[in-house]
């Protein structure tokens, strides 16, 4: 099955190789210089719903690709998005460079030539092109299976919106490519305003809402997941840099619909969601799927780039956290255990145990480790494949706790204060975090006054290391202020370049230099980066 998908994808590229080389928003065309695996004509392929469903797998593959031939992993959730949105914040720092520019992403010294900057743009547009092929062609196909057709189209619109959502948040103004085409002269490569890109994202998600089913396979969006994503889009629009005054109310209304649907509920055990065994629960909305089932040598890396030291070296500890973040937690908050102050060692009976350290002793590397996603600690338990990458844990894009916290924020942005209902949902998230009964008011835990700072902090306590923080800080206009808190502690003084380097321009990434160079002037650098 995987080989068949690859054949389809490469044949699509064969049909459009000239177009993609000229388009250049997909970066330089050198990435297409690979042997074709088949001469199957894609025009003859797209005939049945099953054909399109098979091709849709190739769109999802953009999210998890570990392809080494075009450095795809640096623009997917296999590796790239395990940095972007997480590091360069007050939650996560890059402890060392893996030779691909990771430290530069963490300390704001990256340039338009950074590999993560380049490959993220490349992969998002690659996904957009694949989604465009399905949307354009399936729309013209008559089928007796209208439910399957609607689902495939709905998923394609949803994924295309997700790719553009990443692009507009990371790069600001970007081109909009709406259709499959082999005619370069018909392309509009002009940079569209942030508002225009958001309008396109909204139209895609509204279409997805109309088409998607109430239930779907794991890892595939549903009707309600599309509503959650649209609410998230509106909420991001309501903050910086767009500051759309009407968007927050639209987000609030959508989130209320989601909550009132009764489809979701907080799970009792917070940490159970991150061990790879309990991901599909009442709190699950949508995630990026990884597996280690013998069909791939890789699996995923969720939790691997960070983690704690262990004898088998199954965690890289390249991304870490810091005492400044740890100290923001209430000591009673069980979510503080997302931060580990220990390493794993073998005891005298050859059992793995946690060895805690005193930062003052100097006996153990005095770091605070990010330890939310907890996979098996031995190569035997991890299974076959590359032991330190064969990880089946999924990356949670959004879950119900996020919905409840967004609802409070949307209410605050809309009305200037939150309602009693919104405050109750906000405090339900807190109670679960403190290990108290979720639905019973608790004066020692509950927040009576909930303002912007309270919401931003609670999102960090609840959603830390899940890829929300950088986008949250930008939306709240708090990126520089938050980043400059890192390095004040002696342990993290080595990361003070992060605080020294951050500038207003860093609310966006630069347009990749290879894109600019190969566009013949059609695409120019972000104004903040000129």
Image (spheres, rainbow, N blue to C red):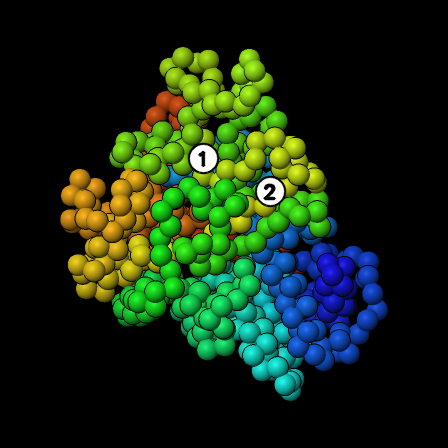
Q: How many marks?
A: 2
Graded by Cα atoms within 10 Å as few (under 14), some (14 to 19) or many (20 or more), the crowding at tag 1 reads many
The residue pinned by badge 2 equals 391
Mark pair 2, 1: CA separation: 17 Å
Residue in the image at 33% along x and 36% along y: 334
Residue 45 seen from this side: yes
Q: Secondary structure at mark 1?
A: strand
User: Is residue 179 placed above or below 474 in the rendered structure?
Assistant: below
Q: Is residue 452 left or right of residue 49?
A: left
As rendered, which of 326 and 420 lies closer to the eye? Answer: 420
Residue 251 is at least partly visible in this image: no
Residue 135 picture location, percent across and down = 59, 76
Q: Residue 46's spot in the image, x, y percent?
A: 71, 77
Q: Which mark is residue 501?
A: none
State the image coordinates of residue 295 (x, y, percent, origin top left). Answer: 71, 50
Residue at horizontal 30%, vertical 31%?
A: 327
Mark 2 or mark 1: name the one nearer the start of the chain. Answer: 1
- In the rendered structure, the answer to whether residue 266 lies left or right of residue 451 reads right
Q: Going by the image, does 448 lie left or right of 366?
A: left
Give the answer, above or below, for where 350 lies relative to 91. above
Q: Residue at x 42, y 68 (%)?
A: 224
Name which quarter of the figure residue 437 lies in: top left
Of badges 2 and 1, the one in the foreground is 2
The residue singled out by tag 1 in the image is: 370
């Amino acid at each position: 099955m995987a080989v068949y998908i690859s054949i389809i994808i490469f044949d699509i590229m064969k049909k459009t190789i000239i177009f993609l080389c000229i388009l250049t928003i997909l970066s330089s065309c050198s990435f297409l210089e690979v042997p074709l695996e088949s001469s199957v004509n894609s025009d003859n392929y797209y005939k049945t719903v099953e054909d399109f469903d098979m091709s849709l797998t190739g769109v999802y593959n953009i999210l998890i690709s570990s392809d080494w031939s075009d450095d795809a992993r640096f623009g997917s959730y296999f590796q790239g998005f395990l940095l972007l949105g997480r590091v360069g914040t007050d939650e996560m720092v890059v402890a060392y460079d893996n030779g691909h520019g990771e430290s530069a992403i963490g300390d704001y010294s990256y340039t338009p030539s950074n590999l993560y900057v380049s490959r993220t743009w490349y992969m998002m547009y690659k996904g957009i092109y694949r989604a465009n092929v399905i949307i354009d062609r399936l729309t013209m196909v008559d089928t007796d299976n209208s439910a399957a057709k609607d689902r495939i189209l709905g998923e394609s619109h949803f994924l295309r919106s997700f790719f553009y959502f990443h692009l507009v948040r990371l790069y600001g103004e970007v081109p909009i490519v709406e259709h499959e085409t082999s005619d370069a002269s018909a392309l509009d490569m002009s940079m569209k305003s942030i508002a225009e890109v958001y309008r396109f994202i909204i139209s895609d998600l509204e279409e997805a809402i109309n088409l998607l089913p109430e239930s779907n396979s794991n890892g595939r969006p549903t009707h309600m997941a599309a509503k959650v994503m649209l609410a998230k889009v509106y909420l991001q629009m309501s903050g910086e840099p767009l500051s759309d005054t009407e968007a927050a109310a639209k987000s609030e209304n959508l989130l209320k619909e989601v909550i009132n649907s009764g489809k979701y509920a907080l799970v009792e055990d917070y940490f159970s969601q991150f061990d790879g065994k309990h991901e599909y629960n009442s709190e699950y909305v949508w995630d990026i799927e990884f597996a280690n089932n013998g069909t791939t040598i890789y699996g995923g890396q969720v939790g691997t780039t960070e983690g704690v030291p262990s004898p088998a070296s199954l965690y890289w500890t390249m991304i870490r956290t810091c005492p400044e973040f740890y100290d923001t937690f209430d000591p009673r908050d069980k979510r503080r255990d997302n931060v580990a102050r220990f390493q794993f060692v073998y005891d005298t009976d050859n059992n793995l145990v946690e060895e805690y350290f005193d930062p003052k002793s100097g006996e153990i590397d005095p770091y605070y480790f990010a330890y939310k996603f907890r996979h098996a600690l031995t190569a035997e338990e991890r299974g076959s494949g590359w032991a330190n990458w064969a990880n089946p844990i999924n990356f949670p894009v959004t879950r119900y706790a996020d919905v409840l916290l967004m609802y409070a924020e949307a209410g605050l942005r809309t009305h200037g204060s939150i309602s009693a209902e919104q405050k109750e949902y906000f405090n339900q998230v807190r109670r679960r975090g403190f290990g108290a009964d979720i639905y019973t008011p608790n004066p020692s835990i509950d927040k009576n006054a909930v303002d912007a700072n309270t919401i931003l902090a609670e999102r960090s306590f609840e959603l830390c290391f899940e890829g929300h923080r950088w986008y949250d800080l930008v939306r709240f206009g708090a990126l520089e202020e938050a980043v400059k808190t890192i390095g004040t502690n002696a342990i993290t003084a080595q990361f003070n370049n992060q605080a020294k380097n951050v500038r207003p321009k860093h609310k966006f990434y630069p347009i990749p230099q290879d894109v600019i160079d190969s566009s013949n002037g059609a695409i120019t650098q972000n104004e903040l980066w000129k």
